[in-house]
Amino acid sequence: MTDLLDIRGLTLGFRGLNGYTEVLHGIDLSIARGERVALVGESGSGKSVTARIILGLLQETRTARVAGRVNFDGRDISSMRARPRAALRGTDMSMIFQDPTSSLNPTFTIGRQFAEVMRRREAGLSQKACEARATAMLEEVSIPDPARVLSAYPFQLSGGMNQRVMIAMALVNNPKLLLADEPGTALDVSVQAQTLTLMQDLVARHNTAVLLISHNLGVVREFADRVYVIYRGRIVETGPTAAIFDRPGHAYTRALMAAVPRITGAGLPEVPEVSDDFLAPMVTHPEAT
């Protein structure tokens, strides 16, 4: 069976005063149907722009130059025209952004925003049908009194409640791929943990493939089946999650692991300085049998 998402040789450059500056350099990445994959690296390494290319957002800007192949569900979406590519967003692929409060429109009720998402797949869906499906989805994410939430505006809900709304909205059309860009980063640690558990249960129930974008290695270890490590726009290590964490093979991956604070009373961790080893060839761990 072919992978749901298959990216080969992906490059990205942005136009500046002195021409194009390349920020992604030959990214190869794949996700199987129902698989949970994490893309990890420090801020500015290229994680979020990779997700935006998958969604087809950067291909439609004049300042970005995208090359390479992005196959999704057997179709080459990198060569698609803008309109059919846009039709995939919110239907076959959805995204959860970092800050749920700023990602929701403050001038529309939650119910109206749910309806707009659902009508991307079924344009003629009645208001009653929208409310019924939105209510069922809010119950799936354990939101009490969904009728009250559907009539509320985002600013009337807590950050944790808005995060659950975002997850429900992202999954209401049963997408094949969910892109989660640092979900829960804007929330406190206990709500982040609840969000992670909720996402794990829901994507398993709906058999949704996930690309989790994160610099939080604790979250990645709990959530992902497989990991890609990105550094300066290059994939430097990939493999099953257990192999990456137990036997990190690349110098940059080891530096990421060393940077994780540990409650040992021994002070701050010693993080290796950036060196030429960080640009060593990619390390690939064999898949677990």
Image (tube, grey):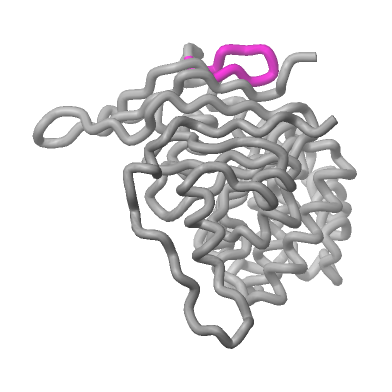
Residue 282 falls left or right of residue 38? left
Q: Quadrant of the N terminus?
A: top right
Q: Position of residue 283 (x, y in %)?
A: 55, 34
Q: Position of residue 58 (x, y in %)?
A: 40, 32
Q: Residue at x 77, y 54 (%)?
A: 199
Q: Position of residue 41 (x, y in %)?
A: 49, 50
Q: Could you tell me how many numbered marks the image carries? A: 0
Q: Residue at x 35, y 28 (%)?
A: 12
Q: Nearer the viewer, residue 23 or 152?
A: 23
Q: Nearer the viewer, residue 171 or 262?
A: 262
Query: Residue most toward the left?
Result: 18
**Do we see residue 172 in this rendering?**
yes
Does the stretch in magenta take in 71?
Answer: yes
Q: Position of residue 206 (x, y in %)?
A: 86, 40
- Residue extent of the magenta highlight: 70-78
Q: Nearer the viewer, residue 254 or 260?
A: 254
- Judge whether 183 appears above or below 33 on screen: below
Q: Quadrant of the C terminus?
A: top right
Residue 204: name its quadrant: top right
Q: Residue at x 67, y 59 (%)?
A: 219
Residue 261 falls left or right of residue 140? left
Q: Residue at x 56, y 12 (%)?
A: 76
Q: Nearer the viewer, residue 44 or 149?
A: 44
- Judge whether 195 appears above or below 1 on screen: below
**Do we see residue 116 in this rendering?**
no
Residue 44 falls left or right of residue 225? left
